[in-house]
Image (cartoon, rainbow, N blue to C red):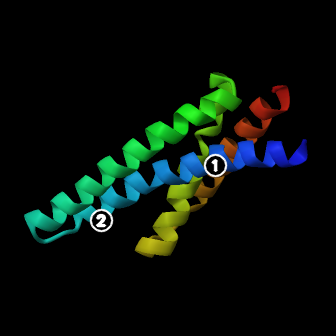
Amino acid sequence: MIMQKVKKYALLYGAFIIYSMVAVCSKFASSQPTFIRICFFLGLEVVFLGLYAVVWQQVLKHFTLVTAMASKGVVVILNLLWSILLFSEKITLFNVIGAAIIIFGIWMVSMDG
């Protein structure tokens, strides 16, 4: 029973990791010097979106749409993480407060279902 729940949530958050990679590819594309390299990263975005669409359909077999969509706020937190790790960007206090509000909201929604 617990392993099934772990697998469900791994699928859900795996989908969000895939979706967060779209923003990463977009950021990389914006800094490329040549058209070919820009197209590469934009193509990679399309691949991630296609993969996300397939995984998202599987997620919706296990979660209500309300729970799945409410949990999608995790992508904001993942994007903050990618901005630190991949782009050496600074995170402000307001970013942290916003992420905390998102986590609280996800927790509130998940308590119901």
Which residue is more in the foreground, 68 or 6? 6
The quadrant holding residue 65 is: top right
Q: Quadrant of the C terminus?
A: top right
96 to the left or right of 88: right
Report which residue position mark 2 lands on.
28
Name of the residue lying farthest toward the right: 1
In percent of width and height, residue 85 lies at: 51, 73
46 to the left or right of 94: left
Report which residue position mark 1 lands on.
13
The number of numbered badges drawn on the structure is 2
109 to the left or right of 37: right
Circles 2, 1 touching at the beta carbon (< 8 Å): no
Kindly identify the residue that appears in the image at 59 percent across and 35 percent down: 58
In percent of width and height, residue 22 lies at: 39, 52
In percent of width and height, residue 11 lies at: 65, 46
Mark 1 closeness class: few <14, some 14–19, many ≥20 residues within 10 Å? some
Q: Secondary structure at mark 1?
A: helix
Amino acid bearing label 1: Tyr
Q: Secondary structure at mark 2?
A: helix
Kindly identify the residue that appears in the image at 30 percent across and 65 percent down: 28
- Tell us which disc is closer to us: 2 or 1: 1
Which residue is more in the foreground, 9 or 77? 9
Which residue is more in the foreground, 2 or 21? 2
Amino acid bearing label 2: Phe
Residue 111 disc label: none
Above or below, 32 relative to 3? below
Above or below, 62 relative to 24? above
Q: State how far apart marks 2 and 1 are (Cα).
A: 23 Å
